[in-house]
Image (cartoon, coloured by chain):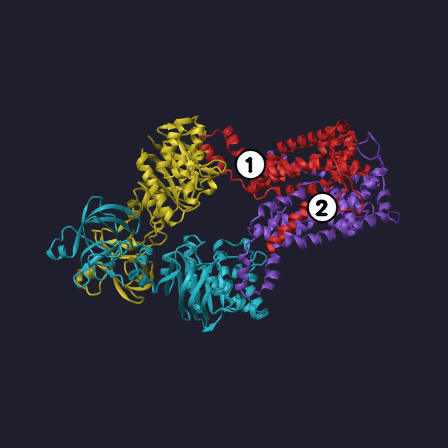
Chain colours: A yellow, B cyan, C red, D purple
Amino acid sequence: MGYLELQNLTINYGKTPIIRDLSLSISNGEIVSLLGPSGAGKTTILKTIAGLLQPASGKILINNIPVNHLPAEKRDAVLIFQKPLLFPFLNVAQNIGFGLKMQQITGIKAEKKIGKILEITELTDLQNRKIHQLSGGQQQRVALARGLVLEPSILLLDEPLSNLDASLRQQMRELIQTVQKQTGTTMLFVTHDQSEALTISDRVCLLLDGRLRQVGKPEELFYLPAAPEVARFFGCNNILCGTDDGKKNITTFSNTHLNRCSNGGKPFTIRPEDIEILSASRTGPEVLHQSFEGRVIGVTFEGQLTRLTIEVKKIQITVLCGRPTYRIGQSVRLKMPKNCVHFFP
Amino acid sequence: MGYLELQNLTINYGKTPIIRDLSLSISNGEIVSLLGPSGAGKTTILKTIAGLLQPASGKILINNIPVNHLPAEKRDAVLIFQKPLLFPFLNVAQNIGFGLKMQQITGIKAEKKIGKILEITELTDLQNRKIHQLSGGQQQRVALARGLVLEPSILLLDEPLSNLDASLRQQMRELIQTVQKQTGTTMLFVTHDQSEALTISDRVCLLLDGRLRQVGKPEELFYLPAAPEVARFFGCNNILCGTDDGKKNITTFSNTHLNRCSNGGKPFTIRPEDIEILSASRTGPEVLHQSFEGRVIGVTFEGQLTRLTIEVKKIQITVLCGRPTYRIGQSVRLKMPKNCVHFFP
Amino acid sequence: MRRKTILFCIFVSTALPFLPLLLWSISEKWFYPALFPQVFGTRAWTYVFTTSGNQILDGLFTSFSLALVTTTVSLILGIPAGRALGLYDFPGKKITMLFLTLPIIVPPLSVSMGLHLWFIKLGLAETFIGVVLIHLTFCLPYTIFVIRGVFTDYNPDFEEQARSLGASPAKVIVMVIFPMIIPGVIIAALFSFLLSWSQYLSTLIIGGGKMLTLPILLFSLMGSGDRPVAGAVSLIFILPAFLALMSSAHYLGRTGLKGIR
Amino acid sequence: MRRKTILFCIFVSTALPFLPLLLWSISEKWFYPALFPQVFGTRAWTYVFTTSGNQILDGLFTSFSLALVTTTVSLILGIPAGRALGLYDFPGKKITMLFLTLPIIVPPLSVSMGLHLWFIKLGLAETFIGVVLIHLTFCLPYTIFVIRGVFTDYNPDFEEQARSLGASPAKVIVMVIFPMIIPGVIIAALFSFLLSWSQYLSTLIIGGGKMLTLPILLFSLMGSGDRPVAGAVSLIFILPAFLALMSSAHYLGRTGLKGIR
């Protein structure tokens, strides 16, 4: 069982509030990611939940029990730091058993628990290794195992993938998901990498400027951003003012001014990969009505996608398309499918 | 002017050859990237060209002149290391002027050259700063400027973007491209990041297991890989054996065995983002003929694209599509457009 | 080849001084032009370990207790001070470091002379405590330096990680901090001990001839001209340094001699 | 608050020993129960700087030349050895390091005694060169240690980068290596100088009373009981340590005292 609830949490650094009025509740067995740029205070939140920092105000509840007054070692939440921080004077199995020893769990009972976790994290062969004999990825796995073995209600993970290179990151990501399925542990993990957050989590909490800007499923944040800042965070620069025909078909659009619209338009966004480029041959009146003529002013081949910058009436629109078949200077017609247009609430 | 030619270059580490029989020629003003996994010996090649290592055999020609016998300081090629390696006892301008001083260029002439490079690299305001007062990105810029000011025929760059975070990387990438346009310097740069290589370079040289596997324009390597290893390096796991109807329309396909085909098929690949998923409503005989029925067994939302694993006759196919509208277990029809199918030569 | 030469030179130049001491201690007769003793014998060693050598055993005991007490006090005061200097930045840190180097580089002779009169006034001259205090003037800064070095490489996040894994503050000290810093502490203790152990001038000045430590006995033996006995005592005198060095080789190797480089 | 207390304690405990030396040197009369001199005066300083103090100026010169030569030789041998130990791994490196610590932790008294007879045989006893050699037995290992520390933080890629930027091997040494290691070299030189400068026993044993360095004069002044003059000479004796420390504060701060921690 693992429920976590944060009620109006405010956390200060010195006397400056860095996290303001944060409320969040996480259900049993969820993987929730706390996403935000570096320096947004994500680690601070984890440390506060773990009991290593005191909040200026607000309540923390684990399994519906307030824990504000409990010291770190008595909270039913384990924080795994970004660096593995394995004790160099203990071997792998001893490191994993450290927390059990603290709980007075020793002997066969401890061995069984450690053995099970070693298996899940595929570390059985390494259990007698010394820490300095492990690779970075193995160390990260031991650090994860060290937390999991305690079967905490809440596992707090601080950027568990950030110190790993691409292929290890993929492995570790899958391991976390497998472990989560096998143990059903509730996990809150912190990352600054949007693709990591989108891939791994049931829900994503986006933290910008010390506040939760949006909480929801990955697709919600990606396709239905609550604010222009959210859209920009996910790499979407097409923030425009538009008027529609009442059926969400955009009829005209213009640039926003500080995310606001004058002259009657409403701010909307459309993801660069959702914009369609119509073939030049289609020129019926219906097509003309629902599309916009523009000129390609930038082409960057990025591999899976090609980034086009297209100027429509002096407004720059970013479009991501498949194969790089367009040239700079070429005239194209853009279509913004109505089911992809998102007006900000 | 900057031509570089490598003829049958073999480089040993100790007595083990790590680069074998490498031939490559680079024309004036090209940006060529040397792409390969970490530890492939890319840096070794740069050091050999720069004269810091001696090849076991083979010739190096700069501007058609053999330079094998020349020491590093007399070769018309400057290597910029991965780390900025700025001299801490000199300020920014002095660091940039270091190479000029070595060439006995001093006084007003040196100042002019330094001033020009400071401008190009947007470092003019920082010229009197000490090195430890610079950010990582600024240090990288100074390191680039320090090489550029010498106006070498060939500029060799070792992972110039790898120490930078995402936004700085973008800036530095644009800077390198701008500088290249303004100065026309021939550049050979090394990277392990495929998107970096694809985005920035005129030509890409893929180095796998000590050999050049393919050299060509970014799109060529990406869409027309010379071998299954090349396709896999660029993230394409769809390596299959297929038979076609003579017009490149795939009629049947099966798994390859060690990249080889038995029973008459020919090995081919198709990029995951090129496979089309047909809507269930289209069921004409023509559609049925050119498409394959399969079942979705994996869905990972990755943001811009969604990764689907689809099982067709027990063969797993990876498909990258836009919005995550498919569910595990769903039946779909796949189409492999004939212009996207690539048979290995 | 070049490196082997360097290695060989270093080895010879460090081992060389100790050979004659050994030769002296087992010689009965060794006069000027000979490169090696003319007559070997065990007179010196017998002398040292018989009743007539009581003075030497007393000296051994005095030196040992002085060094032990000095080291203990150095560690008790030096560990918190070194931790503060290593982990935290605070105004005046740089000047503190500078002043700490002073007793290390200023000769003990001057320090002892300076403090002598005050020690007389405070009744500390010619006492055990007085000599411990004068030894502390250089052992303590040295200890603080070594411990500070340990803590500059120390990551206090380990303590927080242990807390989150269920360790109480007391257990963090015993089961995390202590094992993490023990190699450095051993080196600090070692150096503090040997520094105190090898003091001559400061012990002589403050002890005023009442504290007959091994180096003081050794120097008077030198003066008396009984070189075989002086050689034997000298070897006893070197013994703890040698033992400590060998037994701590493990730690020295592990920390890359960070503490003392 | 706690840190300020630590700071204050450290400051007081390091500055304290030098105050009485100053007081002694300007006192004419200072007898037992008084905390401060009863009569002040400049007799001691006058004595030191007049013709009758010639012996002291000679001692100053002897000490200075000894320390200078020792330091120079230490650097010449220590820089390549320290570079090899800091940059490269080779078999026997660990044991070399271990043997290098030996002369640092073994008291100079034993080393000097051990080498004395061989020095006599080689005609080095009671000579300037002999005393330099005995000072080198500990100054050189110390220098190697400090220089090794410098080179463990040193990245030889700087040299290759300089080559690629057009610097010849000779220019790399002068314009890259030298400026990179100069702070560490200064610290090494400083410590070597001060170590030699403050030697007493080893100079006495090998020099055999012929090399009247400042510490030897100082100790005999102590014995003669003229404490005001001893105080003044003691201050002169401390002066280079103090000056060097202050002038190198810049470098010490910069390298975080890496060399000596």
Question: Nearest the camera: B52 or B77?
Answer: B52
Whole-percent x, y for residue A180 in the image: 33, 37
Position of residue B198 in the picture relative to residue C108 (left or right) = left
The quadrant of the picture occupied by the N terminus of chain A is: top left
Check residue D195 in the rendering and tell me which mark sits there, or answer none.
2
The structure residue drawn at horizontal position 34% and vertical position 39%, both measured from the top left corner, is: A32
Whole-percent x, y for residue A211 in the image: 39, 41
Vertical relation: A83 (above or below) D175: above
Type of the residue with mark 2:
Leu
Position of residue B176 in the picture relative to residue B230 (left or right) = right
Question: Nearest the camera: B302 or D209?
Answer: D209
Q: Residue furthest left?
A: B285
Whole-percent x, y for residue B180 in the image: 43, 66
Type of the residue with mark 1:
Ile
Check residue A224 in the rendering and tell me which mark sits there, or answer none.
none
- Provide the secondary structure element on which disc 1 rests: helix
Residue located beneath label 1 in the image = C181
Q: Kindly indicate the quadrant of the structure image that contains residue C227.
A: top right
Whole-percent x, y for residue A12 in the image: 46, 38
The mark tally for this picture is 2
Q: Kindly indicate the quadrant of the structure image that contains residue C129.
A: top right
